[in-house]
Amino acid sequence: MGLIYLDHAATTRPDPRVVEVMQPYFREYFGNPLSTHPFGEKPREALERARGQLASLLGCESRELIFTSSGSEANNLAVKGVALARENKGKHVVISALEHRSVTNAAQSLAKRGWEVTTVPVDCYGIVDPDDLRAALRADTTLVCINLANLEIGTIEPIAELVKVVKENSSAAFHADAVQAVGHIPVDVGELGVDLLSVSGHRFYGPKGSGALYFKKGVRVQPLIDGGIQEGGRRAGTEDVPAVVGLGEAARIAEEEMEQRSAHVRALRDRLHDGLFERIPHLHLNGHPERRLPMHESVCVEYVEGEAMILFLVREGVCASSGSTCSSRALKASHVLLACGLDPAVAQGSLQFTLGWENNSEEIEKVLNVLPEVAKRLRAMSPIYPGDDKA
């Protein structure tokens, strides 16, 4: 058995069908989509076909989608673009305590320029209380940002309920970072009621460098990149046609195969969960036990440092994560886990397994054989571990 990849929240391997449909747009159909001569025709058609495929997955109209280079760019465009476009209505932004750094840092960038930012807390499962959100809203609130599903703990927020609170109590636009959710669970922007929603292709078997922002008709977004008229004048720069084509194909496949893939990874995740809690004492589940992404298992192994476990697991051929890849080199407790009320010492022992459709039961059994021994070995070195299972 080779290396086992259990870090699909960081990135996924592009589906072979995605790679295949991208190839012609590197070679035969390399033209600029804006070109009026024949070399621009096929790329232009490909862009709109991909836009339609993603729109079908999200339940929106094609013209409500802007292609971006990543989920982070989509988040920045949503946060800064909407805030700047609506600043005459107010300069107050609300975000949750669990947002990705591309949202929190974008909000802090606004704060440095005069906006006020209110952070709404979460409960121990990482869920935003509608009453807390209601209390955070003000007459000058112009934007609310709450992620649909959290990268680190897998918790799925009650977005439709939270949108209702916002719409009943303010005129603010509602943005949902759905980078971790799209392609893995049903995401219908109409049912959610959101005004903006971010997507990243490489999180659901599409290519890196592909992302999108949904914006409801009537929502104004000020461009962050000055230049040409691409993407309806909202995002300048020649589109990366191969990446967009790959994103569209990933969306098409997800719409057709999501139910099957979700059932597969959920069964593996449940086996992993049960086995870990049977074999490792002093184990804490991060996130909600039921309202969570189907492929996501996040735990804290008490009295053990997460990075040390990662290193030992890699030696055994298992590749997992100790939190958000964007923050993994910070060597400090996750802001997400701390926001959920975990003791910083416990949060240091975080371990995250995110499964993909290529994983199998044999790989899960190997993790269940390896990790308990890794935890036992590391705990044997701990002067504070109270257990009697030290080596």
Image (tube, rainbow, N blue to C red):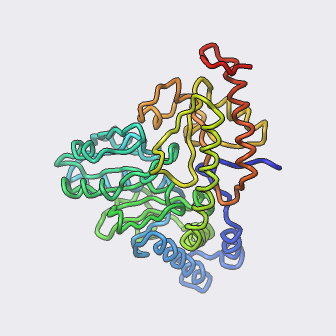
Q: In the image as oriented, which residue stretches furthest toward the right? A: 1
The quadrant in which residue 229 appears is bottom left
Q: Nearer the viewer, residue 81 or 118?
A: 118
* Direction from residue 79 to residue 279 in the image, left or right: right
Q: Horizontal and vertical percent for residue 72?
A: 49, 52
Q: Horizontal and vertical percent for residue 244?
A: 57, 69
Q: Is residue 82 visible?
A: yes
Q: Nearer the viewer, residue 152 or 61?
A: 152
Residue sitting at 58 percent across and 53 percent down? 295
In the image, residue 61 sits, relative to residue 135, either above or below, namely: below
Residue sitting at 25 percent across and 54 percent down? 166
Q: Horizontal and vertical percent for residue 382?
A: 65, 17
Q: Is residue 331 visible?
A: no
* Direction from residue 169 to residue 112 in the image, left or right: right
Q: In the image as oriented, which residue stretches furthest toward the top? A: 383
Residue sitting at 65 percent across and 42 percent down? 275
In the image, residue 82 sits, relative to residue 252, either above or below, namely: above
Q: Nearer the viewer, residue 56 or 352?
A: 352
Disc tally is: 0
The quadrant in which residue 33 appears is bottom right
Q: In the image as oriented, which residue stretches furthest toward the bottom? A: 38
Q: In the image as oriented, which residue stretches furthest toward the left? A: 139
* Direction from residue 233 to residue 382 in the image, left or right: right
Give the quadrant of the C terminus.
top right
Q: Horizontal and vertical percent for residue 345?
A: 52, 23
